[in-house]
Structures are given as C-alpha cells and as structure tokens.
Amino acid sequence: MTARAAITGWGKCTPPVKLTNADLERLVDTSDEWIIDRTGIRERRVSHVEVVDMAEVAARQALAAAGLAPTDLDLVVVSTMSPEIVCPSSACLLQERLGAVNAAGFDVNAACSGWVYGTAAAASMIAAGAAGRALLVGAEKLHWMIDYWDRSTCVLFGDGAGAVVLEPAADDEGVLGIDLGADGKAGRTMVIPTMGTRGSLTAERNPYDHYFHFEGQAVFKIAVKGMEASVLRVLDRAGLAPEDVDLVVPHQANKRIVDAVVKRLGIDPGRVMINIDTHANTAAASIPMALNDAVDQGRVAPGAVIVQTAFGGGVTWGSTAIRWGERTEPLGHSDFELPPCDKSVFELLRASREFFGPMHGKTNADAVPPE
Ligand code: ACO
C-alpha cells in the first residue's frame, strides 16, 4: 500500500418526484403511522430517468467540489444493483457521458453494501498505485424492481445517487481501515431474481419470476449483528475505539436498525447521520447521499473520523473508517440537473402496478388509484 485515498469531492442526485406515506396509503393497506414507527421513513423519491442520468448529476457535483475535470480521472466505479443494462457497465456509460476519456470503468454489485465495497475497491487501487484520481458513484432505480401492491416491501425503498472523488491523501487522512464480509447461505433471505440469465429466453416475462423475496425480520437481525461486528473490526484495524468516531454514516435501511447498532456500540445517537425520513433505502446510493447531506449540514469537521457501515443482499456487509481532510467546503459547484418530470408519482408506478397486479388479483384498471 503506497497512499491512502481521501474524499476530495462529493455530490448527490435526488430525483424530483416524491412518493409520500400518504401516497402509499392510496396504493396499499398501510398507514403513515406504521411506516414511520417501524422504519422512520416519511417519503422517498421515484426516478423518471435512468440510473446513469442520476449518476451523472451526482458525479458532476463531486467533480466540481473536488475542482477536477472529467479528464483528470483515471478510474470510474459505479456501485449499483439496478443497472439500466448489463453491458456496457453503468461505469462505462457514465465515463462516456462525462467525457472521462482517461478513466477505466467497472461496476460493483453488493446490493446495499455496494457503496462500502466500491469504496474498498477504489481506495485499494489508489493505495496500490493502480489508480490515481477515482470517481465512485452509488446509483439506484429500485422502484423498477419493487411490487407496489406488496406493502411489506414497497414502503421501504427509494431512488437516487451519490458520488465522491477519491484522491491520494496527505499525511494520515483518507481511508484508515476496511472490513468486508459475506454469507451466501443467508442470501436466501433477500432475493431479487429479475435481470439475470436464469430462466427461458423465450418465455413471456412472468411477475412470479421477478418477485422480490424478502424476509424482513431475519434481515433485521442479520443487519444489527453484522454491522455492529463489522464496525468493531474496522475500528480495531484503524487503531480506533467507538469513542473516537465523530460521525457514523450508516446504510439507511431502517431507523430502528441504525438505532440498535449504535446503541450496541455505545455511540452517541447525536453522532449518527440519518436521512432515511426523506430518502428511504436507496441501497448503494444511501451512504453517499447521507454523507453529502452531512457535509452540507456542517456535520463533518476538518479531520473528522467517519465510519461508513452497511449490510445488504448477498448477504453482504462492510465498513470503512475514514479521516476527513481539512477542507469541508466544495471548490466549485455544478449546475447540471435532471430534466423536469411532467408525470405524477402514480403514473411513474403504473408499470409496476400493471406488471405485478395479476399476482394480487388486480387488473390494469386498478393500477392508478382514483383521484
Ligand atoms: N403497513 C402496515 N402493516 C404492515 C406493513 C405495512 N407497510 N408491512 C408489514 N405489515 C404488517 C405485517 O403484515 C405484519 O402483520 P401481521 O402481524 O398481521 O402478520 C405486521 O405488520 C408486522 O410485520 P413484521 O414484518 O413483523 O414487521 P417488522 O416490525 O419486522 O418490520 C420491516 C418490517 C420494516 C421490513 C423490518 O423487518 C425491516 O426493516 N427489516 C429489514 C429491512 C432491510 O433492512 N432491508 C435492507 C436490505 S434490502 C437489500 O439489500 C436489497
């Protein structure tokens, strides 16, 4: 290892259309009170554009914040479990959009742990001298794979993107420690069979083959124990203790999971970044979006020790310990935005409701709720 990778730029993309708990009350048998009480979520975003469109907005912000041009990059990594196509990778589609002609590009899929795995990959390449300036993006369009007739999953997820620029660090800044792990056997608790080669090429798309199988309570227990153990390991590797942590930026899957993890770690809840109320679970995008909000809100001080921790499908988990640099202000700003959306949230969810409707005895006429 030759150099630590430090975060020098940050950005996010929040698509404009909101899906509130009140909207969900019109789609499934749920309530604002149940969702807030069990998850901490009040609203989430539904994207009218593709993953690379969101990734581009976040990436251009991160590059501007770092004061870099796309041609300065030599690595683009996109963490996603919802790529718009399989090949080219989202990273290569983004590389073309940005004009990052000097950069290599590849995708990482570790579901909701994708951001931590992507950080580990990019930071390790920088440390090994295989890359200099890297752009890492977490971007997800999860609504595409969710059944909006199924109240047990449709309230949990949102769309969005977040990005950072990583560069070789000075002194003791940057990624101080990495912990990654997986348990394929426990992976049966969360399965999204869509978008793979399994099944017949000729068969019509069948909603039963695309159904998101999810054992919420089992995942909850794995998440709490897995993230606690992972944070302790990463702190140990970095020579730090829980009391040294200035800010935890956890994967935003469920506020109760985060509360339980930080309680077990003995970390003050005031040192934890939560934005699940407005974003919900955006898988690989959740940590960079929360980190971006933390910096914008002045919650990241120069030299702060930040722990990122996540768990997700696979089952996977991971944590990083990072020492922030001296600069907490962006060097520049990007005005690049998503195109406006003229559709209602119910129109954006129509495809899901029509596709999965027959599994619930519903027809296309039921897809969009009456005014
Ligand atoms: N509205 C109202 N009631 C609901 C809803 C809803 N949206 N969803 C479920 N319920 C009902 C259930 O049907 C059940 O009713 P019953 O008692 O009559 O059978 C009752 O509420 C309790 O259901 P539980 O599943 O026991 O509720 P729980 O408190 O465990 O909360 C939740 C469910 C929020 C899913 C929780 O288990 C959780 O957050 N799990 C982890 C999710 C997660 O972290 N996922 C991230 C990984 S995803 C990935 O990587 C792709």
Image (tube, rainbow, N blue to C red):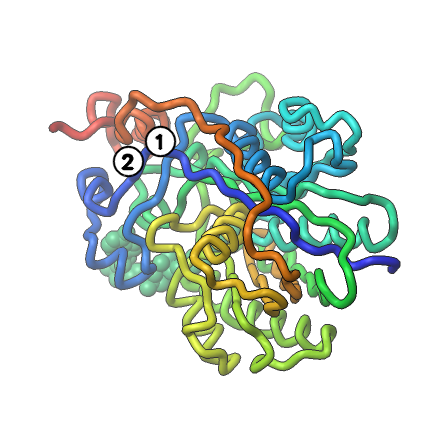
Residue 4 x, y percent position in the rendering: 78, 59
State the SS at label 2: helix
* Quadrant location, the C terminus: top left
Residue that appears at 59% across and 44% down = 331
Residue that appears at 43% across and 34% down = 208
State the SS at label 1: helix
- The residue carrying mark 1 is 356
Q: Nearer the viewer, residue 191 or 15?
A: 15
Residue 269's place in the image compared with 298, above or below, is below
In the rendered structure, are the residues bearing label 1 and label 2 in contact, judged by CB atoms less than 8 Å apart?
yes
Residue 263 x, y percent position in the rendering: 45, 79
Q: On the image, which quarter does residue 255 sit in?
A: bottom left
Give the mark toward the camera: 1 or 2.
1
Q: Residue furthest left?
A: 371
Measure how far apart labels 1 and 2 are at the Cα level: 7 Å
Q: Nearer the viewer, residue 287 or 170?
A: 170
Crowd tier of the residue under label 2, counting other residues whose Cα lies within 10 Å: few below 14, some 14–19, many 20 or above = few
Q: Nearer the viewer, residue 106 or 330?
A: 330
Dot 2 amino acid type? His
Instruction: Ligand 1: give its quadrant.
Output: bottom left
Tag on residue 360? 2
In the image: residue 92, left or right of residue 208: right
